[in-house]
């Protein structure tokens, strides 16, 4: 591994299971001396030992944190390259993903470039997987928009280093893709989507665990969104949260309407998606009124 990599890839991992083998094997097939890969493992679930034994070229950091934003922040702070990619342990990169990431940033001046998210062939008939896939990644279901876009997936995105806050903030507050990208757009920057940065999702989570995590995500997100605001403004935000499930479902239906396979799965998953959106909305309400509590520590997926 070179002392001056051109691309660092950071993977936060909390109970990923054996899928992390596929994730790292896909990177191994295309990596070169100018690439460093850092896995930041939380929860002491055996992931760190597995990676050290089977992928000795990967840098491993063990953390007492079990929150993906915190794990990502630690990894980014430790990375050394001018380009930093963020992947999830359950995502398998497409062929030439590394080459495409470097080429895209050499071509574009924009600070953030991401791709689409496919569902693995093995999961195409699993209702439970479609529920979590459509909930998180409906905007990135192929065929997805390329060029300048309004949003990018947090599990396949590459940044120029100047897009990040300083190392101290990364280690203490973690890295939150939604807030980082919002800050970039407020600065007049644009986000770019590239077909060459597509990943395949291999995630299978129990719906009960996923339901609880939506509440924690919603609470953590809303508390950070209004952390500097007076209570009156926080209360105003909270009053509007009951409308969120309907708003979210309408957006998803509109985005998936011209994607026949995903559209029919959306209809089949609609009751579960509604419950998940209600969980998020309840979390947002609590976050606006009472802050994050311990929700940030439970953001595992």
Image: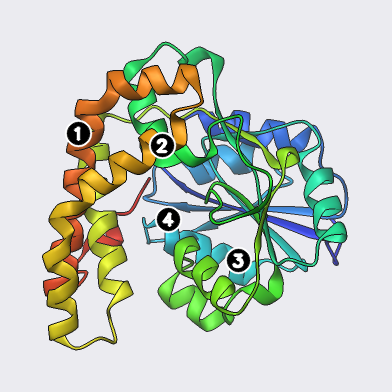
Q: What's the CA distance linking mark 3 and mark 4? A: 12 Å
Q: Position of residue 20 (x, y in %)?
A: 55, 35
Q: What's the CA distance linking mark 1 and mark 2? A: 27 Å
Q: Which residue is mark 3?
A: 76
Residue at 54% across, 46% down: 155
Q: Which residue is mark 2?
A: 254
Number of other residues with Cα within 10 Å of mark 4, as a class: few under 14, some 14 to 19, many 20 or more: many
Q: Quadrant of the C terminus?
A: top left
- Seen in the picture, residue 66 relative to 164 is either above or below; the reply is above
Q: Which residue is mark 4?
A: 68
Of marks 1 and 2, which one's residue comes earlier in the chain? 1
Of marks 3 and 4, which one's residue comes earlier in the chain? 4
Q: Which residue is mark 1?
A: 208
Examine the image and state in which quarter residue 295 appears.
bottom left
Number of other residues with Cα within 10 Å of mark 2, as a class: few under 14, some 14 to 19, many 20 or more: few
Number of other residues with Cα within 10 Å of mark 3, as a class: few under 14, some 14 to 19, many 20 or more: many
- Seen in the picture, residue 16 relative to 259 is either above or below; the reply is below
Of marks 4 and 2, which one's residue comes earlier in the chain? 4
On screen, residue 131 versus residue 171, left or right, reads left
Of badges 3 and 2, the one in the foreground is 2
Q: What's the CA distance linking mark 4 and mark 1? A: 19 Å
Residue at 26% across, 33% down: 273
Of marks 3 and 1, which one's residue comes earlier in the chain? 3
Q: Is residue 293 visible?
A: no
Examine the image and state in which quarter residue 105 appears.
bottom right
Of marks 3 and 2, which one's residue comes earlier in the chain? 3
Q: Position of residue 291 (x, y in %)?
A: 18, 73
């Amino acid at each position: 591994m070179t002392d001056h990599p051109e691309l660092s890839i950071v993977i936060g991992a909390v109970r990923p299971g054996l899928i992390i083998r596929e994730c790292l094997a896909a990177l191994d097939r295309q990596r070169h001396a100018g690439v460093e890969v850092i896995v930041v493992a939380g929860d002491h679930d055996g992931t760190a030992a597995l990676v050290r034994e089977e992928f000795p070229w990967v840098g491993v950091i063990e953390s007492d944190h079990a929150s993906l934003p915190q794990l990502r922040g630690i990894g980014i702070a430790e990375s050394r390259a001018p380009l930093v990619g963020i992947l999830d342990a359950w995502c398998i990169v497409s062929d030439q993903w590394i080459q495409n990431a470097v080429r895209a940033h050499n071509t574009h001046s924009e600070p953030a470039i991401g791709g689409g998210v496919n569902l693995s062939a093995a999961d195409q008939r699993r209702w439970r997987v479609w529920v979590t896939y459509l909930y998180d990644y409906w905007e990135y279901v192929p065929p997805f928009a390329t060029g300048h876009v309004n949003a990018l997936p947090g599990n396949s995105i590459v940044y120029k280093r100047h897009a990040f806050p300083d190392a101290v903030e990364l280690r203490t507050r973690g890295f939150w893709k939604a807030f980082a990208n919002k800050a970039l757009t407020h600065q007049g920057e644009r986000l770019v989507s590239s077909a060459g940065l597509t990943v395949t999702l291999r995630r299978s989570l129990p719906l009960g665990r996923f339901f609880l995590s939506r509440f924690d995500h919603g609470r953590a997100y809303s508390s950070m969104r209004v952390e500097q605001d007076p209570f009156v403004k926080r209360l105003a935000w909270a009053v509007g949260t009951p409308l969120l499930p309907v708003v979210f479902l309408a957006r998803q239906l509109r985005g998936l309407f011209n994607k026949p396979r995903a559209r029919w799965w959306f209809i089949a998953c609609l009751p579960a998606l509604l419950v998940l959106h209600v969980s998020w909305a309840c979390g947002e309400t609590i976050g606006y009124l009472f802050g994050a509590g311990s929700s940030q520590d439970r953001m595992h997926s």
